[in-house]
Image (cartoon, coloured by chain):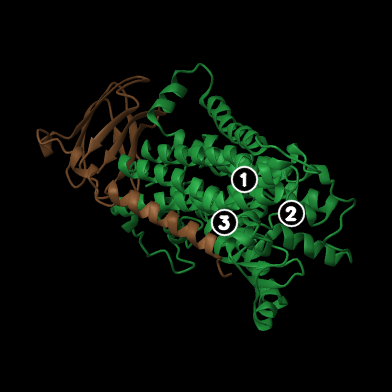
Chain colours: A green, B brown
Amino acid sequence: MIVVPMHGLGGARDLPIPASLAISAAVAALVISFTVLILAWRTPRYDARTQGRPLPDGFARFVDGAPLRWTLRVLGLAVFVYLGWALLAGPDVVTNPVFGSFYVLLWVGIVPFSLLFGPIFRAISPMRTVNLLLARGTGGDPARGVTGYPPWLGYWPAAVGLFGFVWQELVNESSTFLGTVRLWLALYVGAMLVGSALFGSTWFKRADPFEVYSTLIGRLCPIGRRGDGRLVLRSPLANLDGVEVAPGLVGVMAVLLGSTAFDSYKDKISWVDFVSRQSLPPEVVNTLGLFGFCLVVAVTFSLAAMSTGVYGDTRRTALPGLLVHSLVPIVVGYMTAHYLSYFVEQGQATVIQLSDPMVNGSNLLGTANLSVNYWLSAHPSFLADAKVLAIVLGHITGAVAAHDRALRLLPRRHQITGQLGMLLLMVLYTGTGLYLLFGA
Amino acid sequence: MSFSTPAARTIAVGVLTLVTSLGVTGCGSDSSGTSSKDPSTDASAQKLDVSIKGDTITPTNKRIPVNRDEPLTVTITSDRSGELHVHSSPEEEIPFDKGTTTKKLTFKTPGVIEVEEHISDTLIAQLEVR
């Protein structure tokens, strides 16, 4: 039996969270925000360059050693080739594991795997490995390309790539047909190969949407690297302080947060009704909606970050970029709330499908006879609590990160008032996130 | 990694606030489950009637509460053949021909399930299964 859904992957969605839970979480977010502002420390505490307890030499040798590095690279390449086979030779049905691997294991999986292991995509990235092998083969340096990476370009290519991904996932009505996934991945592979030939491996750090996303989320892993390159154990907040600021970072975060919010919003009956009443094709209306959500995040965040007095050599226009790392935990909270059951349940389904890439009943990996455990969906009350807790924890962590950075950036007399705009905005984001879960 | 007093205090106050506010509003008790169960709705009365005339489908974009483990009777009256897609986990499909087709569905897992008509690409309803 072949079922081709018109929408993205996945069957049932989560029930709306109870109103009482949404309201109490919103109140908690509000109160905690001002508690942070009024009671928390008055001098900056977090410094990713110097802080952290060094990990034992043996552990550092294991992590940075060639055996682990090459194992991960080979693993990444092997998965890429295996899925490439399913992508090019497999049947165009939704049970082809390409879809689950692309939309669930890769896209949603980036969050838990990066939280656990840090910038993991960088270590397995097949395109990085191809660039490395090409450079080795020609006697070149993988880090160098034809020319240097222009600093003004910053993270903008990644922001564009991320928007391209969320468009494919949320707007493209043919997202579960092989043709569009092939096209998307062909463009991705082409952009990565050409970019790395031009600019060397810096290209991956700034332009690979998956690597940029994974490296940002990996900043919340308790293991990080000091300025001197030493592996250390430290508070995720100290690690988060080390997010590399470059042009386009606000754009990247806006796409991540705005698209997750739009994903909740687009399934509301009122939006579906609105789209079906327009004379424009649904894909155009949804593209505008998705872009609008991202734009609203970028504009509101920039305005809130700049709504403060500044002094000395801090330029007001630099503030959004310097504060936007505080959205990383909020994105993790949103993603968890939004994708927890989807990842757990659709992820299991994908692991089962991975054994049968040609959808002909084979069991190559030995997982084909497993069945999906729907425990999480069967316990909606637990699920709702977990989702709300993730949103509130993300909010607290984000508020603390913004507070700590504001202490470093803002003149003393603006340290309290200068944070008000940002705090109110975070409360607004959290309130919106809860409202979307409540009205799901 | 040791937290200084203000940091610890902030976190303590934050956690206390959260616990209190969740406690006061009775989080965890799934009170919403009972409210949707109208005592006048008999289990056998759970139904979804779909009428199809070419590309005109009624109803569209509806939100319908459904009790789980109780059958939902879907009746399709159509002037053409087609297919309803029920996006439960796992997905289900109801092919239909010209005339009247009846199918009973029972959902075991709570969630929001979309029912769509495949040929006209129309969302008929979102079933809110509790």
Residue B88, visible in the rendered structure: yes
Q: Where A49 sits versus B55, above or below?
A: below
Q: Which label's residue is closer to the chain start, 1 or 2?
A: 1
In the rendered structure, the residue with mark 1 lies on which chain?
A
Numbered circles on residues, count? 3
**Distance from the alpha carbon under mark 1 to that under mark 3:** 21 Å
Q: Is residue A182 left or right of residue B94?
A: right
Tag 1 and tag 3 share a subunit: yes
Q: Which label's residue is closer to the chain start, 3 or 2?
A: 3
Q: Which secondary structure lies at badge 1?
A: helix
- Residue A413: x and y in percent read 67, 43
Q: Residues within 10 Å of mark 3 (few under 14, many from 20)?
A: many
Q: Where A341 sits versus A319, above or below?
A: below
Which circle, 1 or 3, is nearer the viewer?
A: 3
Q: Residue at x 64, y 33 (%)?
A: A303
Which circle, 1 or 2, is nearer the viewer?
A: 2
**Distance from the alpha carbon under mark 1 to that under mark 2:** 21 Å
Q: Which secondary structure lies at badge 2?
A: helix
Q: Residue furthest bottom?
A: A58
Q: Which label's residue is closer to the chain start, 1 or 3?
A: 3
Q: Residue at x 59, y 31 (%)?
A: A296
- Residue B117: x and y in percent read 36, 30
Q: Is residue A44 left or right of residue A317?
A: left
Residue A99, visible in the rendered structure: no
Q: Which residue is mark 1?
A: A182
Q: Which residue is mark 2?
A: A204
Q: Which residue is mark 3?
A: A110
